[in-house]
Structures are given as C-alpha cells and as structure tokens.
Image (cartoon, rainbow, N blue to C red):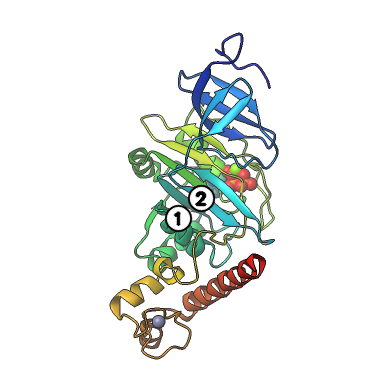
C-alpha cells in the first residue's frame, strides 16, 4: 500500500472515507479530513466509486450501500458502475449514436434502484444534436432531458443547478458521447482526458476508470468509462413493465386483466390496447419484449444453476 497522506505512522488508526477512483488493484480514498490516499484491493474485490469505507492499516472495510447502479455485459457478467447515487444521467450525442434500447434499459435500472434518471443530450452545437434532442423529448416525455453543449457551454447552467440539487450523479453513456468533456466544462479544475475528434461512428474508449469529482457549489459527479450495452440486473421479468418507459404508462391507463400479465398476448392486456390505439410505438414495444426475453433467459439459467 502506498503511504497515505495524514495516516498515523503506525497506520493502525481507523479512518473513514469515500472511494473516489478505482484502478483495478487499488482504489483512491478521500478521507473525512480531506486527505486522499491509495489503498490496495484485490482485483474484482467488488469495491466501486461512491463506496463508503473505513481503512485500518492496509485493510479496507466497505460500509453498507444504499444503492448501486449495475449492468449486465454481453457475456452475462454483472458490472457495478457506482454506489450510493442520487441520480444517473445518460449522456447522448447524435454521433456516436447510442444503440436502440440503451436509454430505456438504463432508465429501468435507475428507477428499480430508486435512483433519479435524466437524459443529457450533448453536442447540441451541431444541428444533428438539436434534432436528436427534439426526438428524445417526444420519445421520453416523462423523463428530465437537458440539451447542452460541452463545447459551447450552452445549457450548462440549467444542468448545473439540477446536479447541485442531487448529491451524487453518475454520467453514463457510449464512448465518445462527451461525458468527460461535460465534466471538464462543469468543473473548471477538472482535467479529465477526452477523446480527440474521431471520424469513427463508434468512437473509442478514452476514460478507463471511474472518477468522482466535486462540483463547485455542491453536488458530485462520477465520470464512467463508455459502454454500449446496458442490461439491467436487479429487475425481474415481473417487475420490468413497471419501470419500462411507455409500458408503465400503458398499464396505468388501462390495467391488464391478469395481475401477472407479461404483455405478450394475454387477453385484456392494457399494453396491447395502447399498441392498437397508437399511444405505444411498435419499436418501443419490441424493445420491451427483447429485454423481457433476455431477463427471462437469465432467470431460467439462474434457476437451473440453483437446482
Ligand atoms: N461538437 C462537439 N463535440 C464534443 C462536445 N463534447 C464532446 N465533444 C467531442 O466528443 C469527443 C469525445 O468526448 P469525450 O468527452 O472524451 O467522450 P466520453 O463520453 O468521455 O468518452 P469515453 O471516455 O470513451 O467513454 C471529443 O472529441 C470531444 O471533443 C460538444 O458539446 N460538441
Ligand atoms: Mg470519458
Ligand atoms: Zn398486459
């Protein structure tokens, strides 16, 4: 373990702090006295940015979490993004494009864990960005949407006051959407690396570790590495519809006949009714079905493993 600034010579006093960065085999802890220090952890130790810890000598104890944002990667592995969050903001840009269903699934994961979701449409200095913002406003009428440009600074004041009201917000989204650029624009002292302008539609991964940064005037932001797949973890096939944008509203408008309706082809289904009258789009419904099928497959695998 590297020697921590301000630690007693024996290193045996118990100190509490917050994990502000994770480097795989070590974490950066900000202690309650404001000093920071690196503490070694085992690879895949399960610690994550936002974790409250106590450190005694070289031993790190994690305190219970109030929530954690997780996703399942394409190989079925659970990846934890950050812990003890108040909000999660999905950063979107026209280029590189965000895969269909990413926003819906991120909203489901956030809501299921009691974390307030928002969408940040970045790069609105480009015409394509403004068009995208308009489109998303009609696709996600119930979600808070910010239109910003990290480059020109437009919309940042409104976003900043929203972030300040929440204690801790994680920025997530595909690589190249501009998460680190936004953080640098919001926090003058931040110097996060950002990707050079890329002609590739898929962008490249610039940020490789999550970092927590204080916003001047209150609130904290967590910058995360980009990823393209977002599959929720803590949501059962039964719960999915309750959190899925568009589906949830359909059920509220016209409750289904069966309480355990999965909204596929059960009679008296409110979701089918919304599809027929056009208040729910075919595309959104298909995304719901795809996510439902993926969760059901995971549940089956888990029940086979338990047997
Ligand atoms: N035109 C325009 N370009 C932007 C804006 N914000 C970011 N960019 C560019 O988008 C590219 C990617 O920005 P990053 O901030 O590195 O993106 P990121 O989401 O942090 O990417 P990862 O760290 O790989 O996940 C860089 O070339 C930025 O200069 C913006 O508001 N307008
Ligand atoms: Mg980044
Ligand atoms: Zn139904």
Nearer to us in this view, 274 or 278: 274
Q: How many marks?
A: 2
Q: Which residue is mark 2?
A: 69
* Location of ligand 2 given as a quarter of the image: top right
Q: Furthest residue to the top? A: 9
Residue 133 in picture, x, y percent from top left: 43, 60
Answer with left or right where residue 203 lies relative to residue 48.
right
Callout 1 environment at 10 Å: few (<14), some (14 to 19), or many (20+)? many
Which label number is shown at residue 110? 1
Q: CA distance from mark 1 to mark 2?
A: 7 Å
Quadrant housing residue 27: top right
Image position of 116 with respect to 64: above or below = below
Quadrant in which the C terminus is drawn: bottom right
* As drawn, 55 above or below 202: above
Q: Earlier in the sequence, mark 1 or mark 2?
A: 2
Q: Residue at x 37, y 32 (%)?
A: 218
Q: Crowding at label 2, few (<14), some or many (≥20) Cα neighbours within 10 Å?
A: many
Q: Residue at x 35, y 65 (%)?
A: 141
Labels 1 & 2 near each other (Cβ < 8 A):
yes
Instruction: Look at 57% across and 59% down and name the residue there.
Output: 230
Q: Residue furthest front?
A: 307
| Pointer 1 residue Cβ closer than 8 Å to ligand 1 | no
The answer to which of 221 and 60 lies nearer the viewer is 60
The answer to whether residue 240 is above or below residue 195 is below
Which residue is rendered at x = 61% and y = 50% of the image?
226
Name the spot of residue 39 as percent of width and height, x first: 63, 26
Question: Which element carries disc 2, helix, strand or loop?
Answer: strand
The quarter of the rendered structure image containing the N terminus is top right
SS label for mark 1: helix
Give the quarter of the image for residue 56.
top right
């Amino acid at each position: 373990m590297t020697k921590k600034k301000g630690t007693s010579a024996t290193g045996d006093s118990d100190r509490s702090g917050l994990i502000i960065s994770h480097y795989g085999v070590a974490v950066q802890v900000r202690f309650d006295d404001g000093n920071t220090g690196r503490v070694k952890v085992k690879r895949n130790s399960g610690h994550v940015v936002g974790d409250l810890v106590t450190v005694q000598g070289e031993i790190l104890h994690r305190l219970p979490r109030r929530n954690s944002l997780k996703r399942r990667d394409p190989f079925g592995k659970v990846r934890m993004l950050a812990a003890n969050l108040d909000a999660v903001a999905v950063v979107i840009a026209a280029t590189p494009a965000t895969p269909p269903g990413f926003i819906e699934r991120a909203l489901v994961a956030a809501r299921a864990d009691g974390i307030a979701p928002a969408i940040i449409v970045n790069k609105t200095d480009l015409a394509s960005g403004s068009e995208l913002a308009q489109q998303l406003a009609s696709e996600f009428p119930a979600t808070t949407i910010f239109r910003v440009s990290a480059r020109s600074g437009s919309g940042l004041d409104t976003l900043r006051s929203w972030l300040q009201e929440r204690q801790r917000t994680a920025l997530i989204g595909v690589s190249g959407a501009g998460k680190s650029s936004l953080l640098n624009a919001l926090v003058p002292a931040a110097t996060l690396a950002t990707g050079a302008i890329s002609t590739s539609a898929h962008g490249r991964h610039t940020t490789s570790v999550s970092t927590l940064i204080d916003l001047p005037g209150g609130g904290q932001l967590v910058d995360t590495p980009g990823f393209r797949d977002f599959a929720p973890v803590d949501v059962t096939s039964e719960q999915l519809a309750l959190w899925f944008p568009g589906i949830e509203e359909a059920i509220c408008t016209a409750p289904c006949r069966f309480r355990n309706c999965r909204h596929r082809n059960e009679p008296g289904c409110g979701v089918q009714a919304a599809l027929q009258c056009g208040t729910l789009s075919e595309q959104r419904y298909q995304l719901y079905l795809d996510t439902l099928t993926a969760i059901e497959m995971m549940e089956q695998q888990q029940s086979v493993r338990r047997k």
